[in-house]
Image (tube, grey):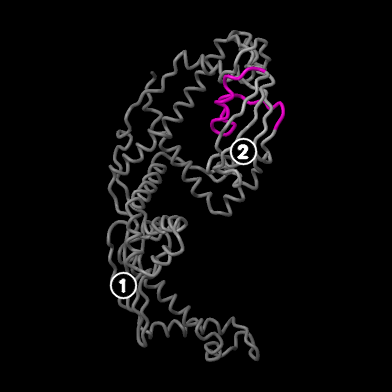
Amino acid sequence: MEIKSNKINSANAEIKATISMDEVNANVDKIAKSLTKTAKIAGFRKGKVPMATVKKQYGERLVQDAEAEALRDVLSKGLEEMGISNDSLIGEPTISVFDKSADKIDVTVKIAMRPVIEMGDYAALVKEFDKPAVSDADIDERIKSLAESQAPLVDIAENRATVDGDTAVIDFEGSVDGKLFDGGTAKDFALRLGSGQFIPGFEEQVIGMKKEEEKVVKVTFPQNYGGKELAGKDAEFKVKVNGIKTKEAVTIDDELAKKMLPGEEDATLEKLRALVKTQIENEELSKLYNDELKPALLELFVETFTFDLPEFVVEQEIDMALNKKAGTMSEDEIEEVRNSEEKLNALRDTFREDALRSVKATFIIDALAQAEKVKVHEQEVMQTIYYEAMQMGQDPQQAYEHYKKAGYIPAIQMSMVEDRVLSGLLNPKMKEA
């Protein structure tokens, strides 16, 4: 056996070998001899089967097993020659060349290794930032909004026109080309003006109407409207306002705090304001982290750290992007790419830069997670999926099984690790406003 090993870089290596057929045949004899002790073949007692009979019975399978053993030997000797341990390998080695002739087999085995990342004082790259400021006006507006959402609707006694925010109690009858359509008629329907609940333009035309007033409202159904028979059509609605309601006036005081903090001893407006302030701060901080700071920090790490990437991982990332792109292509476009290696390679190259950055980011997060001792167990992933499913009114167990069957659990787990790693690096850098 002739072996030539080449450590291309810290993440990729290649082993080229020539395996003589004498070695393969020797492996065949060894495996066949072993089978003579265990094989069950009609007409022979166990352990007494002749080797020739075993070879005839198992034929090509013996050759395949012998070749596989020779390949394992190639891999073992190649790794030893390069000083690479099995623990450092990523994925399965791939055979890029397997050229078999009468007297030998020429093979090339490609190997990928976990890259070594020298990150230095990575925490020093994280810049300080100001904690989001929450004004008294922000707190007042949130409390007012929360209070109004719980306040009951009351009839307006005065005969005034409807305004944005009112709830108009209306009868309406809709038609297209003079014909009534299904779902276009209702009595005493409570419509909050400005909610966007109805077709664009409808609510705006109801604003300004008074109680008992009737009017024809003209609108056009959107092109993407759910009902295809109405999409893009002009429609008329005969509308009558039967009544006008508005939210009961709210007084922001300690009594309101007691209503909004049930079970809270000595509930006061001051306590309510403190809780609302914390809630808004957390919302703003979450938005700042997710929309700006975490993506920018990860991008900074990607730009800063330089290391070798396993080629096959990058190619897998490109494959996923290519499959996603294929879902948006026509049959003719797919056929054109399939029949042209040049066009396929050109299309793959359009995804390469993004794939490189994505793979690089993944390894950086993995290295940071090890450095920061951040782990997310599958039990935590399950709890997260359960919670989100319950929030959406779904069956938690079914949701979890769906994600698991689809193979999404590792991706969710990695996303949670990334969130914890980056948040953990940002938290100490936050300055109080």
Q: Nearer the viewer, residue 68 or 280?
A: 280
Q: Nearer the viewer, residue 75 or 326?
A: 326
Q: Residues within 10 Å of mark 2 (few under 14, many from 20)?
A: few
Q: Nearer the viewer, mark 1 or mark 2?
A: 2
In magenta, the rendered stretch is 186-211
Q: Which residue is mark 1?
A: 16
Q: Which residue is mark 2?
A: 392
* Magenta residue check for 381: no
Q: Nearer the viewer, residue 398 or 237?
A: 237
| Amino acid type assigned to the residue bearing label 1 in the image | Lys
Q: Quadrant of residue 214?
A: top right
Tell which circle, 1 or 2, labels the residue nearer the N-terminal end.
Answer: 1
Q: Residues within 10 Å of mark 1 (few under 14, many from 20)?
A: many
Image spot of residue 319 (x, y percent): 41, 59
Q: Residue at x 47, y 57 (%)?
A: 327
C-alpha separation, residue under disc 1 versus residue under disc 2: 55 Å
Answer with left or right where residue 280 lies relative to residue 95. right
| Amino acid type assigned to the residue bearing label 2 in the image | Met
